[in-house]
Every structure is written in C-alpha cells, then in structure tokens.
Amino acid sequence: MCKRIVLFFVSLSFVFGAFAQESDTIPAGEVPVISYSMPKRYKIADIKVSGLKKEMYEDFTIIGLSGLSVGDMITVPGEEITATVKRFWRHGLFSHVKVLTTKIEDDQIWLEIELRQRPRISQVNYIGIKKGEREELETRLGFRKGYQVTPNLIDRAKMLIQKYFDGKGFKNVDVNVLQKDDLAHEGEVIVDIHIDKNEKTKINEIIFTGNNALTAFQLRKAMKKTNEKFSLPRRFKTSILEIFSTKKFTSEEYDNDKKNLVSKYNEHGYRDAVIVADSVGNFNEKSVNIYLTIEEGHQYFLKDIRFVGNTQYPTDYLAAILQMKPGEVYNQKKLDEHLNTDDESVANVYYNNGYLFFGADPVEVEAENDSISLEIRIQEGPQATINRIIIEGNDRLYEDIIRRELRTKPGMLFSRDDLMRSVRELAQMGHFDPENLVPQPLPDPENGTVDIRFPLVSKANDQVEFSAGWGQVGVIGKLSLKFTNFSMKNFLNPKTYKGIIPQGEGQTLTISGQTNGRYYQGYSISFMDPWFGGKRPNTLSVSAYYSKQSGVNYNFLNNSTSNYWNSGYYSGYPYYGGSSYMGGGYSNYDPYNSYELAYDPNQSLELIAVSTGYGKRLNWPDDYFQFMATLSYQVYMLNNWSNSYGMSAIDFTTGNSHNINLELLLQRSSIDNPLYTRRGSQFTASLSATPPYSLFDGKDYASMSAADKQKLLEYHKWKIKAKVFTPLLPLTVKRTPVLMSRVEYGFLGHYNKNKRSPFETFYMGGDGMTGYTGMTATETIALRGYENGSIAGGNAPYGYAYSRLGMELRYPFLLEPSSTIYGVAFVEAGNAWATLKDFNPFALKRSAGVGVRIFLPMIGLMGIDWAYGFDIPDYSSQRAQRGGSNFHFIIGQEF
C-alpha cells in the first residue's frame, strides 16, 4: 500500500502552492520528490470523501461541489486543486479542508477530499433582553436549531441585532455570541447571544448653522421623530406635540428627518436648500448632540403655470383644483398634494373617471432670478375598464356576499373613489381585518383594462359573552351568543354547516339569557339580514324578548341599602356592578343569610316584546344614508310593583300596559373603520311614536285611575345623535390619534298632559350600560364621572329630556386582527330634565377622565374608564357632593 502524501493543506493563513514528482510511479513506502518548478499533468482515477457523516452529506454531493470529476486532467501542483479548496472555504460550511493523494500510478492520480463540517446549533439562548424582543429577534435572525454556525451567520446576527435596537433608540448595543459544545449531541453547539442594550441614546440638542429664513424652532418641528429632550425652562417655546414626541435617537429616523428638513424649506420656496454637513457627537454617555449645516439658497416664486396635454378637462378647471397662482411662493409640497395625493387632487379627478394611466409631470421650464415658470405636462392615456375582481384570503363568507358589497364591478370604468368605498364596505362587514385591507389595481396598458385584487385577512367576528354582576339579591349571570355570519337558508341543510351552525351569508343571529334564579330572568332572540331577498341592500330585522322579575321585600331593602338612596337600582333592578359603588349599604346585614328574606312573590313585573323592522339604503342626499322603520309591540304586566324601580312617580303599580309604536330612523354613516375609526361621521335622527289615543277617544284622563289611563301607552320620542371623527395626523400613519366629537339630544313628549308615559324615559349617569335587567322601562344614557342614574330633574332618577356633549381623544396601542387596543381621554357634559319645559341646554353636569378600550373577536369591545365629575349630581350616595372620582366598566360598542 502506498504511503498517503499530502498534496495541499489549506487554511485562511496559508498560501496555495504547487507540487510535482519525478517518477511516474510511487513505489510502496517511498515519498516522491515534488518539484514546484515542474508541475505534471495527471488524470483523476478516483475521488473519495472522508471526515463527514454520511447522513449529512452524500459523497456525490461533495464531489460535485469540488468541481472535480473522475477522468478530468489536472495539473499537480496547479490551479484546479487550488480552486477546489477555495470553493469549499467560500461556502463556509467546513472548518477543515484538505485534498490528499492516496496513490499515483503512471499518469493517473487517486484523490481524497478530507473535510470537517462546522457544528450545528442545538440551542439558542438570548441573554439580557425581554421575551417580546427575543421573539422578534428569532423571527428576524433565522438563528434556529439545526443551522450550521458560520462566521457569516454570526456577523449577520450581530448586525441585525444592532440595527433592531438602534431602531428602538439603543445606539450603543454590545453583542457577544459565544459557542460551547453540546455534550449531549456530538457535532452540535449551544449558542449564547449576550446582549447589553446599555442606555437609550437621547438627543440633548439639535444645533443648526446657516438657517436664516426659518427659525430653529420651525426646523425642529419639521424633524418629526428626531427631537430634543424636553426641558422645563424651554416649555413655553415648544409645541405640545413636541413635548409628547419621541426623544430617542435612531439612525433611520434621523435620515428620514433630514429629508423632512429639506422638504420644509421646499415648502417655503427654497427649492435649492441642502444640508451641506451633518454630524452626531456624544454629549455624554446617554445623549448626543446633532449638528446640521444648511445652505438655504434663494426663495422662489411662481411666475406662471401652464397645463399641456389636457384634452378631457379645461385648463381653468384644473387650475382651480391646483389652487396655485402666479406670484405665490413656490411651494413644492402644496404642488404635489394638489396635483397627486389629496382626495380632491387633479390626479383623482382623472382617476375617478377611468383614467388610471394618467400621469402629470411638473417641469420647471424657466428659472429666472427668483421666478419659476411651471409647465404641467399631462399624459391622460385611455380610460381603463375593470376586467376582473380577484378576491383572496376569504374563508368566512360565500364569495357572492362579498361581491355584492363592492362598488367596483367588471365592465365598469375604474374609479378610485369607488375602490376606496369598496374597501370601506368590506371593513363595515366586520369579517375582515380593516388594517390589512389594501386593494391592488393591476393595470394592463396594452388592452386598457385593470384587474383589482382584494387581499383579505379573515378575523373571527362571532361573540360569546358570559358575565356576572353582583346585585342586591345575589349574583346575576348572563350568557349571550352573537353569530354574525349566519345563513338562514341553510338552517335545514346540516351538510352546509361550518361548525355547529350554518354560516356564510353575513346575517346576524343573537340569543341571550340572564337570570338570578327566581328573582329575575330574561331571554331574547333577534335576527337581522342586511340584504333581505339577496338583490338589494334592504335590511330586515325581527326580535322577541321576555323578562320577569320579582320585587324585593321592603324590610330587606331598608336593611341592605342602609342610607343609600334608591337610585342605586340599576335600570329597575338593584345592581351596583356598572359604576363604582361609593355609598354604604352592605355593612349591616349578612347577604348569604338574608337573600331568602328578599324574595317577595307578591311584587312582579313581566315584559313581553316583539318587533320587526325594514330598512333601505338611500341614494339621496348621498348613498351613505339609510332609512329604517320598526314596528314594535310591548306589554308590561305589573303586580304591586314599587315606583322605586326606575319608573316615574305616577301612581301605576298594578295592571297591564300595552305599547304599540312605530319608530322611523334616518341615519348616515361614513366612518372608515367600525373598530378604530379614523375619519368620517355618524348621524341619526329618530322618531318613535304611539297612536294618539287621547286625541280621538273622547275620554277624561284627568279623572281616571293610573292603571286605566296607562292601559294603552302614548308618547312621541325624538332623538338626535351625531359623532364626527377627525384624524390628527395623516392617514398614512397607522397609529393616528383621532379626535371624536359628540352631540346628543333626546325628548319624550305626550299628547295629553294627564296621560304622560311612565316608560321610555331617560336614565342618565354612569357608564350607560343597560345593566343586568333587560328592562326597557327606561333608556340608559352614559355620563361618566357620576353614578348610574344620578343625573335627573324632579324627584326620581329619570328624565323626559336630556342632552349630552363630549370630546374624546383616542390613540391606538395595538391594531391587529386578534385584538384592538386604544386609549381614550375625554371631557363631556350633560343633563336630564323631568319635564320638557325645564330643558336648558346650558345647565350641564361636567366631567373628564381617561380610559382604555380592548376589542377581542370572541368577546367584543370592553373597556374601563376613570372619570371625575365636577358638579353636584341630582341623586347620589353622597348627597351635596360633586360627582367625584368614579370607575366605569364598559361592555359593547356605544353609538
């Protein structure tokens, strides 16, 4: 057997050489003499691979990677072997590379490739960071179990970690990657990534040089994310937005803000402004100073503006949209907005009439002294017709249910307004994540058509509510199931069921029940079809409701509530769970031993209610309007029912009262997102009225008993509600703060002063939740900062008129399909009056507070608010005091 001779041993510090031999055949046991000056050609007779596990790499894979093949002619020493070794090192998969010769015979050579692979990762540990940071880094780095540890992989990991934390304001991050052998797994290592974020890098001061036209204050405001730290002595020179803006330094935001700085100059006519030098220097270990040198150039004005290439619209019309005239400052930001980006821009005029291939190129045809002559060259192109509508990602609804909501249909001319309206309608359905609903027009200029793709991200929209509240006679439980994707036509076809119910048509079925055993129970069912008949957006709704509650023994009531005024009863049922309970009432009795004493079967109130409604989407004044008519029948069956259960002071405690009413509702809603609304408005005006029996039946109601006069209820009820949502930042910013403004008025009138309705009054104060009773004797109106039902005139916690005004600042913390979380800060004012003649829109109870809202798909919207009432309520557990500090728990979306 021939002695193995090493031809090459290559490492990062070696220089490749060449060897030669003097004899054609190597006798056994002899080492050939290799001449560097006389390389020799050999034919490869065989190639073997050693040093690797067969289950990791097959021999033919390594041989193929080497670039050598049996039968090849190579020079020894020569470039072929050198190239092979370099190739293995370049892949970075091996820590040891050798090419050996095992035999030389005449002009043939036998080679052996000896390799040692780099270890693989068995475990990765992140040390020094939080769980959320670790999870995000795992996604970004791709540093996972089973990967080979290479120098490139480690260098890339360090770079990405530093970049990630730099974006969070940690500019001085130290990253150390250590490897240690995994004793339990041969050839594998445990990787420990030690991360020391150090302190966040703050901005101490931004120093400008060369700015004369714009002040340092204006320039700092233009740098939206790169801000100086707020210091108290300068608080009157800084804007409120600057006080609450970020102060950390990140390289990415700094680069963006330098562009914003130049754009600010362009906005003021300084089209030649540039940053000629900038530097970032350490002020101390925790902060830096930023130095910016600016060359402003000259300020320019518009000399004239000409439109070229426009054939569909006259120049005067386009100039009116552009709103820029000769003599004005040459504002490039305004030019771009009015030409391309605004909702009322020149581009949108074309886009909304099918000119999808439209383009406008503003060209400075003359720049003389301080004047710019502008020529706007328009390429109108052909009108684009919609070819296909592509819906992707839908696993919730039948596709025709989605398509009927779209305003963009095949064969129509393309319109950007129709496209965005389609997005809004899909968002309003509630089955898809509105934050990821971004349509994609796919134009085809060759045939003048466009395909529109709607990539949808489904989200669960059905809701299950299981809640419990602590009432004066024990725990009241509620279970509610809301199915928002019901399919009535498939109800008798179990094969089409998805889960336990038929789904796919976007109808809503709600079933709920609540009970306290024998003291109270209530059940309801409702169904709503937004496209009744399937051809037009006409709404059909039907509902039924039943409740029964017993009275509370008078002695138990006195003992349990102590000095607490009876307005603590929550919408007719004694419940303290909605708002904070600040009065006494539980210290003088043992509830577990007293509940049996509370039950009074001689007092009861039963309610049966049914209703049906039909609505229609209108086209005038615009197609955001809807009209709805609802016919309802309710019967109240009272037996010795006490007046203190949220009803009026009219002496009506025993008997039946029938309520037949028709409600007419006109509403307009243009909001963009039902969960976190950024813009749009909501408006409703409603009239609910019974027949005016007393005007034509000829009866003397002044001399009647209360039970007789209330057999047939009569009233007319008017309500107006409006909300306006105003974004405080451009809509391109995902986390846009929003200001919501609200105004509400309600009035309950009568046809006969001797026949006022004891029902349908307004119960104002607190969280506005209907509580755990289901009783519709009153309508609950929220006014945070006060206890439930504490706002009213007269001598009972109800009103025949109310008003409510408010403003609410909202900021989103999380906008994801799985959950939506946003904070609120609000001020509001309102009041309720016992008679219409007492109504005074300027006599209001004021409050302010903060809160948070959380939306979970299976539960719905929940929230908690803290509010402080500044005025003295009419009725409270702490009489003659301000509303004071109150916590309110919110369940469900309020109009």
Image: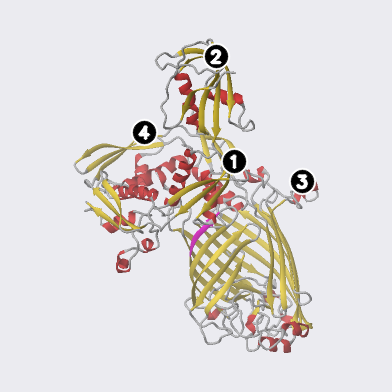
Tell which of 76 and 789 is nearer to you.
Answer: 76
Taking the image as shown, residue 538 lies to the left or right of residue 683, namely right
Amino acid identity at mark 2? Pro
Tell which of 127 and 172 is nearer to you.
Answer: 127
Element class at badge 3? helix
Measured Cα–Cα span from mark 1 to mark 2:
46 Å
Amino acid identity at mark 1? Gly
User: x, y (%) of residue 695?
Assistant: 67, 75
At 53% from the left and 69% from the top, the residue drawn is 744
Measured Cα–Cα span from mark 3 to mark 4:
57 Å
Q: Quadrant of the N terminus?
A: top right
Q: Are marks 3 and 1 in contact (CB under 8 Å)?
A: no
Q: Can you say whether 799 is above or below 114 in the image?
A: below
| Dominant secondary structure, magenta | strand
Residue to which mark 1 is pinned: 146
User: x, y (%) of residue 413?
Assistant: 52, 37
Q: Where residue 309 is drawn, which disc sits there? A: 4
Q: Are marks 1 and 2 in contact (CB under 8 Å)?
A: no
Q: Earlier in the sequence, mark 2 or mark 4?
A: 2
Region of the chain picked out in magenta, as a range: 809-815
Residue to which mark 2 is pinned: 27
Measured Cα–Cα span from mark 3 to mark 1:
44 Å
* Residue 1 painted magenta: no
Residue depth check, mark 3 versus mark 1: number of the one nearer the observer: 1
Measured Cα–Cα span from mark 4 to mark 1:
62 Å
Amino acid identity at mark 4? Gly
